[in-house]
Image (cartoon, rainbow, N blue to C red):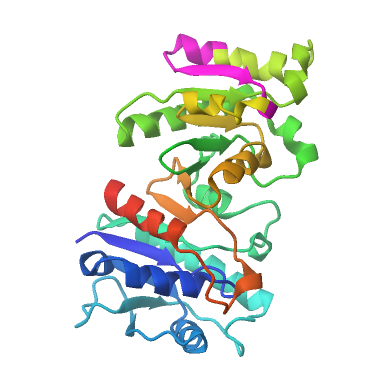
Amino acid sequence: MKKIIILSGDPNSINSELIFKSWKKINKSLRKKIYIISNYNLLIKQFKRLKYFTKVTKINNLNEKTSHCGLKVLNIDLKFKDPFNVPVNNTSKFIIDSLNLAHNLALRKDVVGIINCAIDKKLFKKKKIGVTEFLSARNKIKDQSEVMLITNGYLSVSPITTHINLRDVSKKLSKIKIIAKINTINKWYKKYHKKKPKIGILGLNPHNGELRKNSEEKKIIIPVIKKMKKLGIKIKGPLIADTVFIKDYKNFDIIIGMYHDQVLTPFKTIFKFDAINLTLGLKYLRASPDHGTAKDIIGKNKAITTSLIKCIFFINKFG
C-alpha cells in the first residue's frame, strides 16, 4: 500500500488544526495511507486544547500494524510545557529531526511522497534557508537544479532565487543556474503532465532594465532564452513583471521569476492560498501548503484546509 508522510511542522502554529480538519474530510482509504511525523504527546495535548477528538496511535515504524483507521504517529522527541508555546531551541531540533526522518522514509519504495506543514524559517540553524534548501542539501543536489514551484492547476510560478535578501539576488543569478532549473521544470511537466510546458520568464529590472547593455537581462536572461529555444523548450521572455500578471499569465503554464516575491506576491493576490508548494528535482515528491504558521489564529478554529488537502490529493495521485 502507498504511504504518505505528513510532518506536523512547527508546533507553534495552526498545523494540528489543519491536520485534524483535513483528516476528517478525506475518505477512509486515503486515511490508511497517511503517517504523521510529530511528537505524540504534543499532538494529543494540542487536540485536547482545541477540543478535537479522534483516535491517535504512536507507532515505531511504517511496518507496524494498527487495528483502527486513526492517526498513526511516528514519534519525535520534544520537550515542552505549553503545547502551543514551545521554546525555539526545542522546536528547532524537533523540526530538523522530523525532516531527517521524513527524508530517510521518503527513499523507501512504499513511500510515495512527503508533505510538511508550515515551518517558521527562523527554526533552521543556517540562515537564508527553508525546507526547499534543506531537502536539496539532503539529496546532495550540487548543480542548482532544485526548483521551488507553486502550483494550483491554473498556473505555476517559480523563483530562480528563493529565501535570500533582495540585495543579493543579482549576484546569485547565473546562466548555469537558470538553465538547470528550466530543465528540471521541463522534465517535471513532461513526466507528470505529459507535455512540454509553455514557460514565461521575467526580467529582473523594472521594464527589463530597458535592455541596457550591462543589465542582467542582456547578460544572463536573454542568452538563456535563446539557448533554451534552440533545445526545443517552449519559452518566451524576458516578460515585463509589472504587467504580465494582469492577463498575459493565462498564456503560460508557468511563470519563472528571478526572486521570491516577484512571482509569489502576484500569484497569491490572484489565487490567495489556493495552491501548493512543491520542490522539484528531489529523489521523491515533496509538497507543502502554500501558507505560513498563522500564529495569530491559533485556537480560533479559523484555519482553512484547502491547501493541505490539495497536497494530500497531489501526492496520492502522482506518487
Q: Position of residue 30 (x, y in %)?
A: 25, 64
Is 118 on the left or on the right of 258, as rendered? left
Task: Check residue 236 for magenta coloring.
Answer: yes
The structure residue drawn at horizontal position 49% and vertical position 37%, both measured from the top left corner, is 156
Q: Position of residue 123 (x, y in %)?
A: 65, 65
Relative height, residue 282 to residue 157 (above, below): below
Q: Tell me where residue 309 sits by quadrant.
A: bottom left
Q: How many marks?
A: 0
The answer to whether residue 176 shows anywhere in this view is no
Magenta segment, which residues? 226-242
The structure residue drawn at horizontal position 58% and vertical position 63%, both measured from the top left corner, is 119
Q: Nearer the viewer, residue 164 or 204?
A: 204
Task: Check residue 283 for magenta coloring.
Answer: no
Please identify the quadrant where the N terminus is shown: bottom left
Q: Position of residue 220 (x, y in %)?
A: 67, 19
Is 56 on the left or on the right of 299, as rendered? left
The structure residue drawn at horizontal position 76% and vertical position 44%, both measured from the top left corner, is 165
Relative height, residue 307 to residue 164 (above, below): below
Q: Position of residue 312 (x, y in %)?
A: 36, 58
The answer to whether residue 160 shows anywhere in this view is yes
Relative height, residue 55 to residue 293 (above, below): below
Q: Nearer the viewer, residue 186 or 195?
A: 195
Relative height, residue 116 to residue 263 (above, below): below
